[in-house]
Amino acid sequence: MLDKILEAGRRSTAAALPHDLLRESREWFSRRRLTLRYDEDVSNWVRHMRTADKADGTNPTFDPEHSPVSAADSYWLDVRDGDGRTVACLAARVIRTDDFTRQISSMSLWFDPLPPGLEAPLDLVLPSTTPVISGAVAHYGGHWVHPSWRGQGIPGVMLPLAKILTMELFGSDWDTGIVLVSSARRRDLMAAYGFAEADICYSGFFPPLNRDETFFLAYSSREQTLRAVPDVIRKLRGDAEMPEAGARSPATPGTDTILTSMLPGGPSRVA
């Protein structure tokens, strides 16, 4: 399937942009002896996260047991080392809506249908300047990096790539993410996520985590996402140093390696 995306996709992006980003991303991962795989079955992401080292739990937004996700609207990216072990991942989902904040306030973003006891809506505190986010809204989360690979820039490659991929697959109009206050305070992490805006969204008791929490709604319009891609490509081209961590053995590319299969002449994806 993936080898056909750039040829038969929705053409949401400029013709050369996906090719350039994918090519530079492939080189970035190759220098670190990593491969990046696409998997349309998010239940595999759930299984990984349940046993992942120092993971923060499983986000129900992407869990088929709690949300109506399928290959028609979701996928996850799986970064693996040369021994085939997952060292990083990211989940994506597209929700078609007239107003994305309704999914947040009703908590249907996390649970659909809602379990008993979660019927009360969240009282959002978004500023009046927050635009109406509607249409095909891409939502990203479920991000995890193995402790030995943290601090090496993987989120700054995965998320821009996922945004372009989601445009090509689903014609997304917006890119969004929920960012907890602990992450929002980290400028390096927010820069890696690459969203154009981040507005405070909620503060109070948050049932999905069963604790008091403050979180932000991070978002970019399709146009803002596309404007940011050339800068991402320049950074990838300027990064030619091999990191010390993880450079132990050459990667063994799978036939479903996304960066290979999406580029012209690459092999077809095998499930």
Image (cartoon, rainbow, N blue to C red):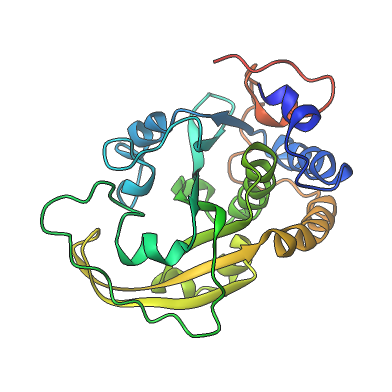
Q: Nearer the viewer, residue 141 or 166?
A: 166
State the image coordinates of residue 21 (x, y, percent, origin top left): 79, 45
In the image, taking residue 270 as reference, residue 24 lies left or right, namely right
Looking at the rendered image, the quarter that the N terminus falls into is: top right
Residue in view at x 76 percent, y 62 percent: 228
At 74% across and 24% down in the image, what residue appears? 4
Quarter of the image where one finds residue 254: top right
* Residue 23: % across, % down: 81, 38
The relative height of residue 141 versus residue 100 in the rendered view (above or below) is above
Relative to 238, say whether 35 is above or below.
above
Residue that lies at the very extreme toward the right in this rendered image: 16
Residue ranking furthest to the bottom = 128
Residue 59 showing in the rendered view: no
x, y (%) of residue 181?
40, 74
Q: Quadrant of the C terminus?
A: top right
Q: Position of residue 148 (x, y in %)?
A: 49, 47
The one nearer the camera, 221 or 236, is 221
Left or right position of 248 against 86: right
Would you place residue 15 above or below residue 173 in this image? above
Observer-nearest of 38 and 65: 65
Residue 191 in view (yes/no): yes
